[in-house]
Image (cartoon, rainbow, N blue to C red):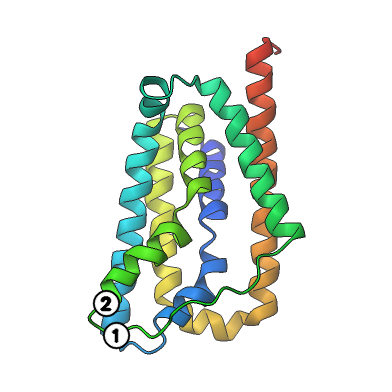
Amino acid sequence: MSFDIWINAFLAFFAILNPIGNIPVFAEFTDDLDRLTRFKVFNVAVATGFITLFIMTLTGRWIMSTVFQIDITEFRIAGGILLTVLAVKYIVFPKPKEQHNTDISVENAMETAIVPMAIPLLVGPGSIVTGILILDRDGYTVTITALLAVFAVCWVLFQLSPIINQLMGRVGKLVLSRILWVFIAAIGVHFLISGIKLSFGIQ
């Protein structure tokens, strides 16, 4: 397993999961919770996100070929277009600040950790597409270890979210989030070009 290949997969997952961009929202959701409950909420959110993305990554290709009769080359092209469009959308037309119901009680905190924190804020269509394409490109070992590593980093960042919020500020988080979306755009273009090359037999 080449380290360059692994770090590329790790950075791709990190960019599409965008934990830095999710920190302000997650911090807002858990602002009124005590430290122990917040710790449990982040545990559930990260665990749910990992399990969901892990299952979809491993079964996605089978679902495509069996249910939808889609070839992985076609999926590369479609996935590349999706990631590129998503990236351009969030870079050029940033989404407005969403209004979330942040009045979370201890009773429904775990439910909120699953929806919307884990799904779709952390794991959405873009991350599922990325997982399937990375598995096809880099294999099981790289994909699974990169997934484990990136969710471990997400867990640490979310646990430290109150401190990170204060240190980075709104501008710092905004700049870093935009840089990650530029990286996602490059990944999308890469998958798109590789899919077109495979379709036309271009080396």
Please give the label number shown on residue 186. none
Q: Is residue 145 above or below residue 67?
A: below
Position of 104 compared to 138: left or right? Answer: left
Please give the label number shown on residue 105. 1
* Residue at figure coordinates x 47%, y 83% from the top left: 162
* Residue at figure coordinates x 50%, y 75% from the top left: 25
In which quadrant of the rendered image does the C terminus lie?
top right
- Pointer 2 local density, CA inside 10 Å: few below 14, some 14–19, many at least 20: few
Position of 77 compared to 153: left or right? Answer: right
- Pointer 1 local density, CA inside 10 Å: few below 14, some 14–19, many at least 20: few
Q: Residue 9 at x, y = what percent?
A: 52, 42
* Residue at figure coordinates x 46%, y 40% from the top left: 131
Look at mark 2 in the image and give the residue it sits on: 108
Residue in front for this viewpoint, 50 or 88 = 88
Q: Amino acid at mark 2?
A: Asn
Q: Residue 120 at x, y = what percent?
A: 44, 58
Q: Amino acid at mark 1?
A: Ser
Residue in front for this viewpoint, 89 or 50 = 89
Residue in front for this viewpoint, 117 or 193 = 117
- Structural distance between the alpha carbons of marks 1 and 2: 6 Å
Query: Based on the displayed image, in which of its 4 quarters is residue 79 positioned?
Result: top right
* Residue at figure coordinates x 30%, y 68% from the top left: 43
- Is the C-beta separation of discs 1 and 2 under 8 Å? yes
Position of 141 compared to 83: left or right? Answer: left
Q: Is residue 106 above or below residue 141?
A: below
Q: Secondary structure at mark 1?
A: loop
Q: Secondary structure at mark 2?
A: loop
